[in-house]
Image (cartoon, rainbow, N blue to C red):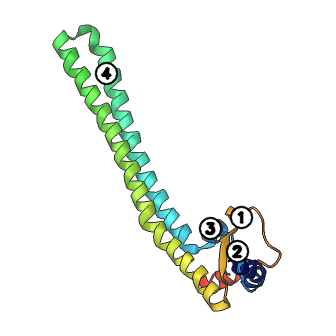
Amino acid sequence: MKRLVLLMLVALPFAVSAQKIGYVNSQELFALMPEVKTAQARIDSLSTQYETMFANMQEEYKKKAAEYEQKSATMTDAMKQIQAEELNGLQQRIQTAYLTAQQDIQTKQQEFLVPIREKMMKAIKNVGDKNGYTYIFDSQAMLYTATNAENLLEPVKKELGIK
């Protein structure tokens, strides 16, 4: 048993030294992909549409609230209650619409960005396979870069057709 442990300790440095290690900054690479700009433009357009809708809803709420304040002195209690319920209902619709919009935007982000991220990961894997890398790390998560590790940003950019 001791011989086996000793043999493993002696062989381990040789096994590790034979491994090829690379790294890539996935955030930088992702930002360089042209598809990301297109997807972000679509998401921004959707966000702008929602912002316009919310602005209109807020304007309607402010208008009705001002009308309520202006006329409340001459209204009966029943009329005040009806108007207050209408304002509360409008406020709840705005809140519900806001939450729905957030969910929709998150869904669209996933729909648009996940395939791009998968394409990037496939390109990283292809570069690793083609060049015999045992490990490829994300430089954002590394605390230390070994002297024999190679930055693979350029080969992966080439794989993706990014200049």
- The residue under label 3 is 31
Quickly name the residue at label 4.
Answer: 67
| Mark closer to the chain start, 1 or 2 | 2
C-alpha distance separating marks 1 and 2: 9 Å
Q: Are marks 1 and 2 in contact (CB under 8 Å)?
A: yes
Q: Is residue 100 above or below residue 138?
A: above
Label 3: few (<14), some or many (≥20) within 10 Å? few
Residue 114 visible somewhere in the drawing: yes
Foreground: disc 4 or disc 2: 2
Q: Residues within 10 Å of mark 1 (few under 14, many from 20)?
A: few
Q: Secondary structure at mark 1?
A: loop
Residue at position x 62%, y 67% in the image? 31
C-alpha span from label 3 to label 4? 49 Å
Foreground disc of the pair 1, 3: 1
Tag 3 or tag 2, which sits nearer the N-term? 2
Lower sequence index among marks 3 and 4: 3
